[in-house]
Amino acid sequence: MSPSFVGLTSKKPCKIDLFARDSMITVSNHRRWHWLVDHLLWDTAGSANSGFLGVIWAMRKPILALAVTLMLTWREWVDYHPLDLLLIVLVAIVNFALVLAAIALLVLTLQRFSRAIKTR
């Protein structure tokens, strides 16, 4: 055998994995993203509609977050009249993130309480 074929036929030495829990972290992150998409961003629970109304129903939580964000940003604009457009955009993004986080916390809390009631 020539030296070029030796590397192809032999197995690679086993490396010590310093991050042994990496696969566990990946599964946990996958579950969080799955929950986020299924229960917060695209929730079709309770919907028999299809088409445009079905899409609006499935996206009701982000639409609610957007509406509350627009109201809060408008209030900031009226109260402080920021001269910089970048500042108002930054405030709008922060408002949207906080409102969406509050909705997620509310959904998670209601899910936990409904499970606790069902197990009694």
Image: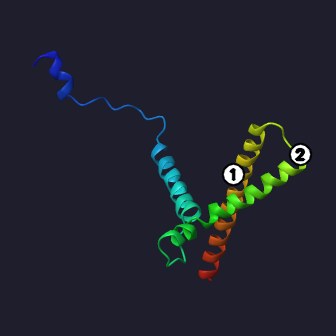
Q: Classify mark 2: residues with Cα within 10 Å, few (<14), some (14-19) or many (20+).
A: few
| Residue 96 position within the rendered picture, expressed as x and y whole percent measured from the top left | 70, 53
Q: Where is residue 21 in the image (x, y as percent from the top left)?
A: 49, 44
Labels 2, 1: front one: 2
SS state under label 2: helix
Dot 2 corresponds to which residue? 80
Q: Residue at x 80, y 36 (%)?
A: 84
Q: Which amino acid does label 2 sit on?
A: Tyr
Residue at image x 74%, y 51%? 95
Give the percent coordinates (x, y) of residue 107.
Answer: 65, 67
Q: What residue type is labelled 1?
A: Ala
- Asked if residue 67 is positioned above or below residue 87 in the image, the reply reads below
Q: Which residue in the structure is indicated by mark 1?
A: 97
Q: Who's the residue at 70% across and 47% down the image?
A: 93
- Residue 117, compared with residue 33, is above or below; it is below
Q: Which residue is at the far top?
A: 3
Q: Label 2 vs label 1: CA separation?
A: 21 Å
- Label 1: element kind: helix
* Left or right: residue 47 compared with residue 76: left
Density class for disc 1 (Cα within 10 Å; few <14, some 14-19, many ≥20) is some
**Front-most of 87 and 45?**
87
Pinpoint residue 104: horizontal percent, then vertical percent.
65, 61
Q: Quadrant of the C terminus?
A: bottom right
